[in-house]
Amino acid sequence: MGRYAAVLFDLDGTLCRHEQAIEPVFRGAFGDIGAEPIGEPTELWAAMDEITAFESETAQLADGIAGVAADRGRELDAQAWAEAFAARLDWRDVTLLPGAETALAAARANGPVGLLTNGPRARQSTKLDALGLDEAFDPVVYAGELDRRKPHAEPFERAIEALGLDPGRVLYVGNSLEHDVAGARDAGLPVAWLDTDGDEPGEHRPTHRIQSIDELADVLTT
């Protein structure tokens, strides 16, 4: 029996990336509703990260951009903007990261393979279908539809319950120190941190540190 009985993966930035350029989508949505652009996409993502209660993706976008507008003292029809933004997004424009297929094969050879992502079901299932991974994971936990997302323990606990395993026997693999490493460790899971930027973990302490996702094979066999 290997060190780990199962592997749980994060999706975005760990196994795949969204190739669509977001800046034209962001700016274009303002033009679609006849409004002057407000802020930057990074401000939108930061505002959406502060949303803890479950909402539809459009509602999250509306709340996020409303926060960006309020911070700048601007008025905006946030719902109309969110609908325009969502209509421009193509979640099928995704590709697997180099080494992802090797990592997935190693995980399957090891045991059960699950997915835990902060995104909502509609968005993330579209990506999985485009990547040919729609039946690759069991369980799949869409934390974007739970009361709390990563780094809260609830999504990890849902995945562990579905696997029926001790948390210490399930390796979580993700690229975010804040959401993946901190969340997994707090929930009692060992974690392999995909560090592609050479960052320092600071207060976070991943169990394993890999610089390419295909290095997961070595983690599982040594």
Image (cartoon, rainbow, N blue to C red):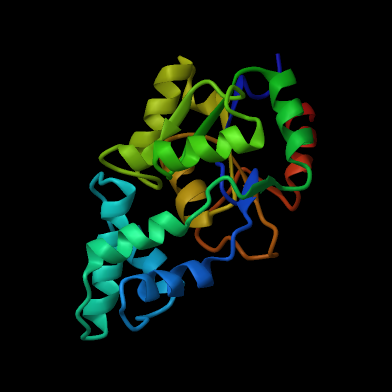
Where does residue 166 sit, x and y in percent of width and height? Answer: 48, 20
Q: Quadrant of residue 198?
A: bottom right
The residue under the point 31% across, 66% down is: 81
Figure label count = 0
Q: Nearer the viewer, residue 109 or 128?
A: 128
Q: Nearer the viewer, residue 94 or 138?
A: 94
Q: Nearer the viewer, residue 203 or 93?
A: 93
Q: Quadrant of residue 164?
A: top left
Where does residue 162 sit, x and y in percent of width and height? Answer: 43, 18
Q: Quadrant of residue 47?
A: bottom left
Q: Is residue 155 above or below residue 178?
A: above
The residue under the point 57% across, 27% down is: 134
Using residue 22 as the reference point, say whether residue 56 is left or right of it.
left
Using residue 215 as the reference point, say whether residue 193 is left or right of it.
left
Where does residue 167 sit, x and y in percent of width and height? Answer: 48, 26
Q: Is residue 45 above or below residue 58?
A: below
Where does residue 200 sit, x and y in percent of width and height? Answer: 62, 65
Q: Is residue 6 above or below residue 28?
A: above
Q: Is residue 172 visible?
A: no
The residue under the point 38% across, 80% down is: 39
Q: Is residue 78 visible?
A: yes
Quadrant the N terminus occupies? top right
Quadrant the C terminus occupies? top right
The residue under the point 48% across, 27% down is: 140
